[in-house]
Amino acid sequence: MLMKRRAEAAHGDVCLYADRALARYGFPDGHPLGVDRQGAFLEEARRSALGANVRLCDSRLATRAEIARFHSQDYIDRVMHAEQDRLAFLDNGDTPVFPGVYEASASVVGAALNGLSRIMRAEFSRSFQPIGGLHHAGRNHAAGFCVFNDLGVVIETLRARYGIRRVAYVDIDVHHGDGVFYAYEADAELIFADIHEDGRTLYPGTGSEEETGKGAAQGTKLNIALAPGAGDAQFMAAWPRVEAHLAKFAPEFVIFQCGADGLRGDPLAHLTYSPAVHTHATRSLRLVAERFAKDRMMAFGGGGYDRNNLAQAWAAVLRELAG
Ligand SMILES: [Zn+2]
């Protein structure tokens, strides 16, 4: 049979977002989040992870109305006019304004929304977007290299457009996903699990294990803080708590922020993971998505500042998503 039916073609297929527009999201002058990260990943992906069921998909610009599903109008204006207003930074010094900052940031969101709509139309089961997962941006502010929070826009779009409310957000970036956590701290339908380096030794300083959600949302949020120096053994020991947490709430959709900055040697953090962590977490979350979420899962690269580390970790994620 030469042609597969669409339903068969979709099973196991992965949409990879890694185009020129996305590569422009990065900061100049030796900033750790430079514009060369996507290329470093692609070089390794071509070598080891681009199987037959991985398709390269094109990003698009998100509209202002789409970005406003998560962000305030005032903040969108601030980013839109940042160059014209000659702002040096969008925050207190981590997130510089760069040429084309609005368009690059809107492309990150637009790629995520394109992936979401293709998954919801069952063209693909899963997506991976290395340049994305900007988990520090809040509804009204930039933070920690993150301008627009693509993850928050996806969560809001799942609710507004698709009527899917019980969403799992899982974050293994070395930094706590504060932009997502605090936006949904009192929201019982956002099932949150985040393993990160202890906030007492690392930006943004939040994500203690006592932070489990507020009000009706108490118990829907899981924060696991690892001590500096912790590696694969500590991660693997903690991961079953993530699995149990997710199973308890049977999420209808899985969002995975797979930052690579927890790997040994990252210049900004102090954990010592190997890419085996990314392999293990992706494999496990695929099973969660298959069991509860009709196989629907989106993965986003997030942080990672050693180029070889991010290439290895994200190639591992892509292999597991596509395998
Ligand atoms: Zn990070």
Image: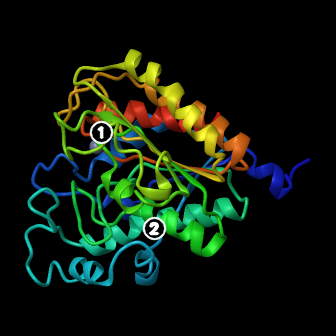
> 5 or 291: which is nearer to us?
291
Residue located beneath label 2 in the image: 153
Furthest-right residue in view? Answer: 1
Amino acid on which disc 1 is placed: Ser
Amino acid on which disc 2 is placed: Val
Left or right, 38 with reference to 266: right
| Disc sitting over residue 208 in the figure | 1
Any atom of ligand 1 within 8 Å of the CB at mark 1? Answer: no
Q: Quick check: can you spot residue 51?
A: no
Q: Quick check: can you spot residue 40?
A: yes
Residue located 27% across and 23% down the image: 264
Q: Are marks 1 and 2 in contact (CB under 8 Å)?
A: no
Left or right, 189 with reference to 21: right
Q: Position of residue 240 (x, y in %)?
A: 53, 26
- Circle 1 SS class: loop
Q: Quadrant of ligand 1?
A: top left
Q: Quick one: label 1, few (<14), some, or many (20+) residues within 10 Å?
A: some
Residue located 65% across and 39% down the image: 288
> 43 or 210: which is nearer to us?
210
Left or right, 86 with reference to 16: left
Q: Place residue 29 in its image quadrant.
A: bottom left
Q: Position of residue 196 (x, y in %)?
A: 33, 35
Q: CA distance from mark 1 to mark 2?
A: 25 Å
Which of label 1 and label 2 is nearer to you? 1
Residue located 21% across and 27% down the image: 270
Q: Position of residue 167 (x, y in %)?
A: 57, 55
> 163 or 231: which is nearer to us?
163
**Mark 1 or mark 2, earlier in chain:** 2
